[in-house]
């Protein structure tokens, strides 16, 4: 029951290779929860299940949140999975494609595996694609209220849903307090990832993240992509954006049609084996 653990700017994932788990079709929600648990399991912000067969890309990938739910896409998860493929010499070239439930992306591994660039696809602000309830529209500068506080937000998808909230009083405490309520707000029928955003200058933003199904998170690639795209759509930053997060920085390049290319580091943490006793606990 081998596992491989990596982190991308403090956002840690465990790679479970189906080849090592011939009796598993995929991890169950209960198995995901205990593996990701910080006390009863190995501990992580999610599980990457792959590589899987696919006709649309070089490799297939499924992404599980620590609460057992499945994510459509994860920028940091994709970077970590790309590093895993590179470490295992599964890819034929430094650049290759990966299919996730949120779409196909293109990865390129450089710097002896330490740096990964991902063409994440295009950001959409269309309420029908995100989704956000109400009439069809681009969701920009709208209002919502949680716990008695009113916020202005914009919503976006890059294969998974995001709610970007500009604030002046950015802090981890702000994300921890209001993020859970925004995640499950009735506006978002599939729940949402939440980014609290502060613009530093025309090429730099800071975000604090509450991740759907995971909670407070030190860094997120898809959150960086969505937040940078929203800031650019609102005219607050240019096309090249450095996204500062508690775990570190990600570089975002915004192209035509709000296509996003993300670049960030990946670090290998551990390779080990899980004991069957781990699954005797229910969390």
Image (spheres, rainbow, N blue to C red):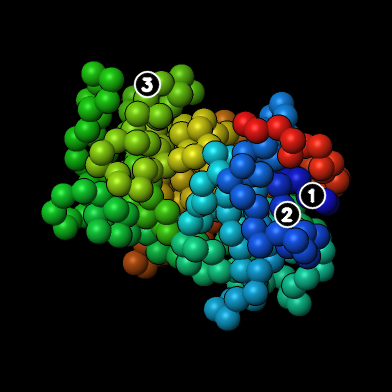
* Rendering coords of residue 265 (x, y %): 67, 49
- Disc 3 from disc 2: Cα separation: 39 Å
- Give the residue at mark 3: 169
Compared across the picture, whether 7 is left or right of 206 comes to right
Residue 156 numbered mark, or none? none
Give whichever of 251, 184 is nearer the camera: 184
Residue in the picture at 49% in, 39% down? 213
Q: Quadrant of residue 88?
A: bottom right
- Give the residue at mark 2: 16
Q: Residues within 10 Å of mark 1 (few under 14, many from 20)?
A: some
Looking at marks 3 and 2 on the same chain, the residue that comes earlier in the sequence is marked by 2
Give whichever of 273, 98 is nearer the camera: 273
- Give the residue at mark 1: 3
Secondary structure category for the residue under label 1:
strand
Compared across the picture, whether 37 is left or right of 23 comes to left
Looking at marks 1 and 2 on the same chain, the residue that comes earlier in the sequence is marked by 1
Q: Residues within 10 Å of mark 2 (few under 14, many from 20)?
A: many
Kindly check if marks 1 and 2 are in contact, taking CB atoms under 8 A apart as contact.
Answer: yes
Looking at marks 1 and 3 on the same chain, the residue that comes earlier in the sequence is marked by 1
Q: Closer to us: mark 3 or mark 2? A: 2
Residue in the picture at 16% in, 49% down? 134
Q: Quadrant of the C terminus?
A: top right
Q: Closer to us: mark 1 or mark 3? A: 1
Secondary structure category for the residue under label 3:
loop
* Rendering coords of residue 107 (x, y %): 62, 66
Give whichever of 115, 145 is nearer the camera: 145
């Amino acid at each position: 029951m081998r596992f491989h653990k990596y982190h991308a700017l403090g956002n840690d994932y465990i790679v479970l290779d189906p080849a090592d788990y011939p009796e598993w079709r995929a991890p169950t929600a209960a198995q995901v929860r205990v593996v990701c648990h910080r006390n009863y399991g190995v501990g992580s912000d999610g599980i990457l299940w792959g590589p899987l067969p696919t006709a649309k890309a070089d490799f297939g990938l499924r992404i599980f949140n620590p609460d057992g739910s499945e994510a459509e896409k994860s920028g940091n998860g994709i970077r970590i999975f790309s590093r895993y493929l590179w470490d295992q010499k599964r890819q034929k070239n430094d650049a290759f494609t990966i299919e996730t439930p949120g779409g196909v992306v293109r990865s390129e591994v450089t710097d002896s595996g330490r740096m990964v660039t991902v063409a994440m696809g295009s950001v959409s602000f269309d309420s029908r694609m995100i989704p956000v309830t109400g009439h069809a529209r681009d969701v920009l500068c709208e209002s919502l209220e949680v716990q008695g506080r009113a916020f202005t937000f914009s919503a976006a998808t890059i294969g998974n849903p995001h709610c970007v909230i500009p604030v002046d009083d950015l802090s981890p405490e702000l994300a921890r307090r209001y993020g859970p309520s925004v995640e499950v707000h009735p506006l978002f029928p599939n729940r949402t990832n939440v980014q609290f955003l502060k613009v530093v200058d025309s090429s730099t933003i800071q975000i604090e993240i509450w991740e759907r199904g995971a909670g407070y998170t030190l860094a997120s690639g898809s959150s960086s992509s969505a937040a940078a795209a929203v800031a650019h759509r609102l005219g607050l930053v240019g096309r090249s954006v450095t996204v500062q997060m508690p775990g570190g920085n990600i570089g975002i390049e915004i192209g035509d049609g709000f296509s996003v290319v993300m670049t960030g580091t990946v670090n290998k943490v551990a390779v080990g084996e899980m004991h069957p006793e781990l699954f005797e606990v229910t969390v």
